[in-house]
Image (cartoon, rainbow, N blue to C red):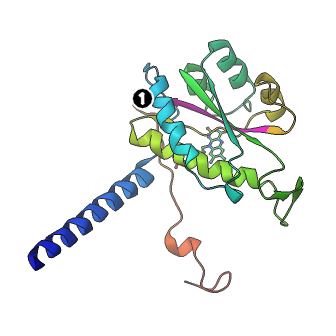
Amino acid sequence: MCLMKFTIYNYRIFIIVLITMELDNIIKERRTVRKFTKHIVSDEEINTIIDAALWAPSWANTQTWEFIIVRDKDQITRITEAYSNTNSARECSLNASALIMACAKTRISGCKNGLQRTKLSSWYMFDLGLAVQNLLLKAHEIGLGTVVVGAMDHEKVKKMLKLPVNYEVVVAIPIGKAAPGGTREAKRKDLKGATHLDFFKNPY
Ligand SMILES: Cc1cc2nc3c(=O)[nH]c(=O)nc-3n(C[C@H](O)[C@H](O)[C@H](O)COP(=O)(O)O)c2cc1C
C-alpha cells in the first residue's frame, strides 16, 4: 500500500516535470516567422489557436477581444498595404493564407461606466496581449509560425474590417508554416538585467 502511494507520488512529479519542460520549450523556442511555406493553414488549425487565446485572463473577465480571420486575398493585400512602408512583415503577410486580426471593444476593460478606473488606460491592450501570446504559443506548439504586426495605419485597417467606432484593431497576425530562413535571432535581457529587489535599480 505504502509502495503504491510512493509510486503514484513519483509518477505525478514525473508528469509535472514533463509538462513544465514542454511549456518551457514552447515559450523559449517560439520565434517570429517572416517567411512561410505554401502550406494553407486549415480552419481547424485556426480554431485550435483561437481557442487557446480565448482562455487568457482579462480585466474582470471582460474578454473584450474579437478575432477576424482574413482569408480573402484582396483583403489580405489591402491590409498589408496599410502596414508601415518598411515593415519587415510585408512580404510574408502578402503570401500568408490567413491573417488573424486581433481587435478589441474599448471602454470596458479597466473601466466603470466607460471611464478608466486607473491612471493607466487602454487595459484592453493588456488583455489582448495576453490572449495573443496564448495564440502565438499554441500556433508554435502545433507547428505554425506567426508574426505580430503592430506598425500599420490602424484607422485605415479599422475601416477595411468594418469595425464599429467602439472597437479598435490592434495587431495583424500573419500565420503559416515556417520556411527555411524565416526566423531571426532575438536576444533577451537576462534575469539580472530585468529584475530589481524591493525598489527600482536595487540589484535582485
Ligand atoms: C506589439 C508588437 C508589435 C510588433 N510589430 C511588428 C511589425 O509591425 N512588424 C514586424 O515585422 N514585427 C513586429 N513585431 C515582432 C517583433 O519584432 C518581435 O516579436 C521581436 O523582435 C522579438 O522577436 P521574437 O518574436 O522572434 O522573439 C511586433 C511584436 C509585437 C509584440
Give ligand 1's quarter of the image. Answer: top right
Side of 42 relative to 1 (left or right) = right
Q: Is mark 1 within 8 Å of ligand 1?
A: no
Q: Give the quarter of the image for residue 25.
A: bottom left
Q: Position of residue 138 (x, y in %)?
A: 46, 43
Which residue appears farthest toward the front when viewing the image?
Answer: 1
In the foreground, 170 or 181? 170
Magenta range is 168-179
Identify the main secondary structure in magenta: strand
Callout 1: SS: loop
In the foreground, 2 or 24? 2
Q: Residues within 10 Å of mark 1 (few under 14, many from 20)?
A: some
| Circle 1: residue type | Ala
Q: Mark 1 = which residue? A: 179
Q: Position of residue 111 (x, y in %)?
A: 83, 57
Above or below residue 160? Residue 130 is below
**Residue occupying image coordinates x 77% and y 28%:** 157
Above or below residue 41? Residue 117 is below
Name the quarter where the C terminus is drawn.
bottom right
Side of 63 relative to 179 (left or right) = right
In the foreground, 58 or 24? 58
Does residue 174 belong to the magenta stretch? yes
Q: Position of residue 19 (x, y in %)?
A: 33, 58
Q: Position of residue 163 (x, y in %)?
A: 80, 29
Side of 171 relative to 25 (left or right) = right
